Image (spheres, helix red, strand yellow):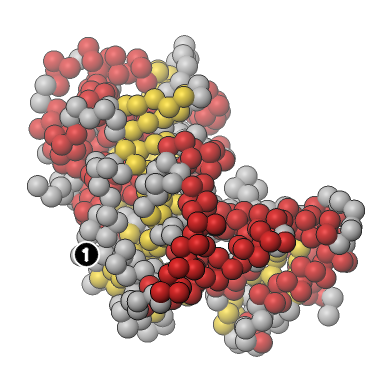
Amino acid sequence: MTPTTLTQLFFGAAERSAGRPAVMRHKRDGAWHDITFDTLFTRVHHLYAGLTELQLQPGDRLAILSENRPEWAIVDYACLAARLADVPIYPTLTPAQTAYILRDSGAKGIFVSSDDHLQKILGIRHELPDLQHIVLFDGESDRAGVITLQDLESRGHTALARHADWRAAALSVAPDDLATLIYTSGTTGDPKGVMLSHGNITSNVVAALQVILVNDRDECLSFLPLCHIFERMVGHYLMLQAGAVINYATNFGTVPVEMVERSPTVVASVPRLYEKIYGRITESAIKSGGLKRAIFEWARATGEKRLDYTLSGRPVPPGLRLAYRLADTLVFARIRNRMGGRLRFFVSGGAPLSADICRFFLAAGLVIIEGYGLTETSPVITANRLTMLKPGTVGQPIPGVEVKIADDGEILTRGPHVMKGYFHNPTATAEAIDRDGWFRTGDIGEMDNDNCLRITDRKKDLIKTSGGKFVAPQPIEGMLKTNTFFANAVMLGDRRQFPIMLLVPNFAAVDAWAAGEGLAKRSPAQLVAAPDVREKLEREARTSLRDLAQFETPKKFLLLERDFTIESGELTPTMKVKRKVVEKNYAEAIDRLYADM
């Protein structure tokens, strides 16, 4: 039976997966530990009963403040079964941001993973009149109003006789009932609570599985925050429905090591991961120099030639096939082994992926299925197919989803994936969804002859120069991210006389270049201030942007001595740049660039 609610999805998986040796794994004390589906099911049952004993009512909200781990999944499924709506909160948010979400959502309780997070909540508890329960994953607590997850599960176990009909009660939820309240990380203003129903997310899981062909022989590595709908739908619900094993990475920094340890077959990530992998590979080739670099460049060119044939459906000439086999042996197979050696495909979402980076991965035999969506759309709207990969596009609409382009170029979508609305914000809801049910995405795009969607930029990110020209910054930034000398780039210049570019150098590549030039080693601050380095990097930037029209070419470059971070407020938890924050943080230096004409 095709599920229409997330509780149907969970109980359906229980019937199919009973007795399986592992449904998820996590690392503790340096070793990986399996969790069977029977264990998962039992813990969810006990926690469901524990939550019900707290006298919580269907529709009440409970928050989750935790990193990715099995307990996150257990709490989520128990909340869904109890017909509660959970509110995920990024662990990286400040106390003030966390308090805002808890107040706005009216959360009756919160699950926290560690004592550090507990201290954050205790510090703001006086601001939260609705908060009644705090549940701690790790450790003990004798504080008033704080219980441990183990205690709550034990309480539920003791009360199981009073909840013998839990399955029927859980399955009584309707597709239109609220499943979760996700606060958009947002690049401006206060976050809005996106109301996603059981039907919203379940329809997206069912549709996406017709495109993202995961099965019960697959394993994924989960490292994007489960607070984000992309990881939650693809790396959580979709994997459960497909019967795949979920491996929880320790953190983002351990991903390269743990990919080799677990050898996943499917990995979902935002473009930043692929940019970093690409940067490390090309940087390593440059550092090797001589014959090794020549072999890498030859293999890359050979892979690109072969890719042109395969993407267009033309037979690869025999000579090129032979050359590619050699390139694969010498270069590409080694790259795949760094990914664990079993990877069937990556899934990319959350932001646009550079077509050049996508092509490099495809040429190396590493498939990337790029998709597109938003929190408000549960999230997937479109996705490339394994049978039709088109770098530079985000593919065709998935089944059941409608897409059209408005007169001003904005992408509109309609279907069962579109949110119920913004929590306690009917004005914002009316602005986002028109009377016919079309959701305004805020992105600019176009459909090609194959009905594949191409994203050109965020509507609000478009730069309008004082000369009246519109410039889309994201594709231009993407050109620079494929250059080994740059780790990041942000284009600014709205309502200014010309655009400028803020550049974060790849300091490892700059150091290697400087050493080759016989220059002394310098700190990042010294490097960005050095005339010889500035000249080199500006020359590299202009070379990367040489095909731009004059009006969209940055006239000035500002070199930064550090990358953007979540902690500085310059990145959202999903690694999107907050342009206004970046512009504010570097306002004086930016003003000097424009003044120095």
- Residue 154 shown left or right of residue 493 in the figure: left
Mark 1 residue type: Pro
Element class at badge 1:
loop
Q: Nearer the viewer, residue 113 or 429?
A: 113
Crowdedness near tag 1: few (<14), some (14–19) or many (≥20) residues, C-alpha within 10 Å: some
Please name the residue shown 35% across and 15% down the image: 151
The residue sitting at 63% across, 59% down in the picture is: 282
| Residue 265 at x, y percent in the picture | 37, 47
Where residue 476 appears, as percent x and y from the top left, is 59, 73
For the point 73% across and 79% down, the residue is: 555
Residue 46 shows in the view: yes
> Please, is residue 444 above or below residue 277 in the view?
below
Q: Which residue is mark 1?
A: 399
Q: How many numbered marks have been drawn onto this rendered protein structure?
A: 1
- Which quadrant of the structure image shows residue 147? top left
Which of 327/582 is in front?
327
| Residue 2 pos. (x, y %) | 13, 50
Up-down relation of residue 576 to residue 410 (above or below): above
User: What residue is drawn where x is 56% and y is 54%?
Assistant: 277
Q: Position of residue 380 (x, y in %)?
A: 33, 59
Quarter of the image with the C terminus in it: bottom right
Can you tell which quarter of the image residue 216 is in? top left
**In which quarter of the view is residue 440 placed?**
bottom left
Residue 420: tell me if it is visible.
no
User: Could you tell whether 473 is left or right of 139 in the image?
Assistant: right
Q: Is residue 268 left or right of residue 473?
A: left
Task: Say above or below: 417 vs 39.
Answer: below
